[in-house]
């Protein structure tokens, strides 16, 4: 009988214990997949929003929470003076509770800027001008709020007419209520303030060099590449740390659980292992057999955890709290990470019991 056959035989010897151990580790891996998938999904969703606007650089406040702090909109004039800048547009974002939606993104865009050009009209019409008391809704936002062109929507204490439904080609855009910057500034009592400047550069420009030059005029702000906006966000870093911390605790518990299972398995098979050593099995082969058993157990648990984590992500994205704000990330790199963590848990939890096996005295074990 080969080591592989021994491994399978030993795992199936106590099927109930094996299944319970697999489920315990699977829940931990599922939590890791769900938490990391959500965090990476936030970064990807916001990155996609900047990409569909064809934004090359973003100016924002340096010390910000998830909803960036506002700054003076006049900064855009200094940005436009750069010879490398083709276009620059002010943008104000708020996260508000609107009617049936507990949280929804409300974005005010500088009227006549390129950020209106990336919105494809699906139904109705765009606002007639930058002062019209009206909004357009991303198609996901319209679905969540149950609105169509001609309806009214209450934001804070004011009513706005819905003139149209648009496709913004990204989850964040489609989950937003969109209106003219000046209208949102008056509504939020933030006249003359914005929290983003979206910048398009001229073709062939060195983006990083231009970012360094713009940083000199953007006093008190930072100039980032679109992909770095969420990654460098203080709140996002805190969320990442909490996700990894929670996952680490869950995986530590799983590791000790598997270690206990492997010790029980070794204890029950002490006589069998003693006979194998007496028959000439090298102790390294015994160690490898126990390690393979632990790794196989955790690898199967990893697959179960990946399925569980993806299922959780699919369910979460349908909830009112998440819908229209992000698309959870599910990619091969996340799956590879989960499997790598599973195998690592298998090695760590099986190593101590495996080393214990190599010290078994054959005569005492058989007796």
Image (cartoon, rainbow, N blue to C red):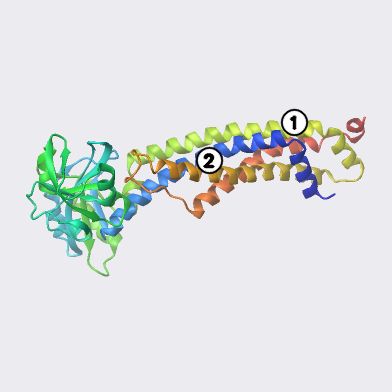
At mark 1, the secondary structure is helix
Which residue is label 1 attached to? 264
Instruction: Report the front residue among 7 and 129.
Output: 129
Give the left or right position of residue 117, taking residue 272 as reference.
left
Of tags 1 and 2, which is closer to the observer? 2
Instruction: Report the front residue among 150 and 71.
Output: 150
**Residue 345 falls in which quadrant of the image?**
top right
Relative to 51, is 15 above or below?
A: above
Q: Residue at x 17, y 43 (%)?
A: 71
Q: Are marks 1 and 2 in contact (CB under 8 Å)?
A: no
Give the left or right position of residue 357, taking residue 257 as reference.
right
At mark 2, the secondary structure is helix
Mark 1 or mark 2: name the one nearer the start of the chain. Answer: 2
Q: Residue 4: x percent and y percent?
A: 77, 49
Neighbor class of circle 1 (other Cα within 10 Å; few <14, some 14-19, many 20+) is few
Q: Residue 151: x percent and y percent?
A: 16, 45
Neighbor class of circle 2 (other Cα within 10 Å; few <14, some 14-19, many 20+) is many
Instruction: Report the front residue among 177 and 365.
Output: 177
Q: Residue at x 32, y 46 (%)?
A: 324
Relative to 49, is 271 above or below?
A: above
Which residue is label 2 attached to? 30
Give the left or right position of residue 220, taking residue 263 as reference.
left
Q: Residue at x 80, y 45 (%)?
A: 6
Relative to 1, is 51 above or below?
A: below
Residue 87 appearing in the image: yes
Q: Residue at x 43, y 49 (%)?
A: 329
């Amino acid at each position: 009988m080969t080591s592989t056959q021994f491994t399978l035989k030993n795992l199936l010897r106590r099927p109930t214990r094996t299944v319970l151990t697999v489920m315990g580790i699977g829940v931990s891996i599922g939590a890791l997949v769900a938490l990391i998938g959500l965090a990476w999904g936030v970064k990807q969703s916001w990155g996609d929003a900047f990409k569909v606007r064809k934004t090359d650089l973003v100016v924002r406040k340096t010390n910000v929470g998830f909803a960036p702090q506002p700054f003076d909109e006049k900064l855009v004039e200094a940005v436009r003076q750069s010879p490398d800048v083709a276009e620059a547009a002010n943008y104000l974002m708020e996260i508000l509770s609107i009617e049936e939606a507990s949280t929804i993104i409300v974005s005010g865009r500088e009227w006549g800027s390129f950020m209106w050009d990336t919105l494809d009209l699906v139904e109705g019409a765009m606002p007639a001008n930058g002062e019209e008391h009206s909004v357009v809704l991303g198609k996901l936002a319209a679905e969540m709020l149950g609105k169509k062109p001609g309806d009214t929507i209450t934001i804070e204490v004011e009513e706005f007419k819905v003139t149209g439904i648009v496709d913004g080609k990204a989850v964040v855009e489609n989950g937003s209520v969109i209106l003219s910057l000046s209208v949102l500034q008056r509504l939020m009592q933030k006249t003359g303030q914005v929290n983003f400047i979206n910048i398009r550069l001229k073709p062939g420009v060195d983006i990083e060099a231009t970012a360094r030059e713009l940083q000199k005029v953007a006093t008190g702000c930072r100039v980032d590449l679109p992909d770095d906006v969420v990654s460098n966000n203080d709140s996002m870093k805190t969320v990442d740390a909490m996700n990894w911390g929670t996952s680490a605790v869950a995986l530590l518990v799983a590791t000790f659980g598997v270690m206990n299972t492997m010790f029980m398995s070794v204890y029950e098979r002490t006589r069998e292992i003693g006979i194998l050593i007496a028959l000439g099995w090298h102790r390294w082969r015994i160690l490898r057999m126990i390690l393979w058993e632990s790794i196989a157990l955790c690898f199967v648990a990893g697959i179960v955890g990946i399925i569980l984590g993806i299922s959780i992500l699919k369910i979460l994205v349908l909830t009112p709290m998440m819908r229209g704000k992000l698309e959870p990330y599910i990619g091969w790199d996340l799956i590879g990470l989960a499997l790598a963590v599973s195998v690592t848990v298998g090695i760590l939890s099986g190593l101590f019991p495996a080393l214990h096996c190599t010290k078994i005295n054959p005569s005492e074990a058989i007796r």
